Amino acid sequence: MRLNTIKPGAGSKSAAKRVGRGIGSGLGKTCGRGHKGQKSRAGGFHKVGFEGGQMPLQRRLPKRGFVSLTAARKVEVRLSELDKLPVDDIDLLVLMQAGVVPADALSAKVVLSGTIGRKITLRGIGATKGALAAIEAAGGSVATA
């Protein structure tokens, strides 16, 4: 295969629509634009959402709520994931290095999913009531500060 022999796949390219070339073409005279009106004119367009001067829908409806930029950076960690870690003293940096949470995570919270069979200490990581009970039952502790 040479660069000068490469061709597009069969049927992938279609000829440009030639308008204004007579009645027989089906796109003669008005060129498929119909008669009169703004859309038939050269340069005739209006911005998206324009309703002819009527107050547009996006301005008639009230503004509501907001999207939190930090919500996606709060991560939930399962107890079973903590059980697999080789260290006993766990903080956010340890979780990042182990690949349990993404590198851009701002905070983490341990949830009761799975079991933990050894003593661990959480530092600076939140935990749900159930997870806290399971960690303390295994002899571990949670230091939130």
Image (cartoon, helix red, strand yellow):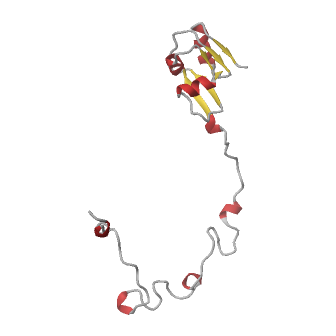
| Residue 50 lies in quadrant | bottom right
| Residue 92 lies in quadrant | top right
Q: Nearer the viewer, residue 84 or 7?
A: 7
In the figure, is residue 53 to the left or right of 102?
right
Q: Nearer the viewer, residue 121 or 24?
A: 121
The N terminus, quarter of image: bottom left
In the figure, is residue 5 to the left or right of 128?
left
From the viewer's perspective, is residue 32 above or below residue 87?
A: below
Count of numbered marks = 0
From the viewer's perspective, is residue 13 above or below residue 98?
A: below
Residue appearing at x 42%, y 90% in the figure: 28
Residue appearing at x 64%, y 38% in the figure: 71
From the viewer's perspective, is residue 46 above or below residue 131?
A: below
In the figure, is residue 49 to the left or right of 27?
right
Picture coordinates of residue 27, whole percent (x, y)? 41, 86
The C terminus, quarter of image: top right
Residue appearing at x 38%, y 92% in the figure: 23
Residue lying at the far left in this picture: please name it: 1
| Residue 2 lies in quadrant | bottom left
Picture coordinates of residue 136, whole percent (x, y)? 61, 10
Picture coordinates of residue 96, whole percent (x, y)? 58, 28
Residue appearing at x 49%, y 85% in the figure: 34
Picture coordinates of residue 137, whole percent (x, y)? 58, 8
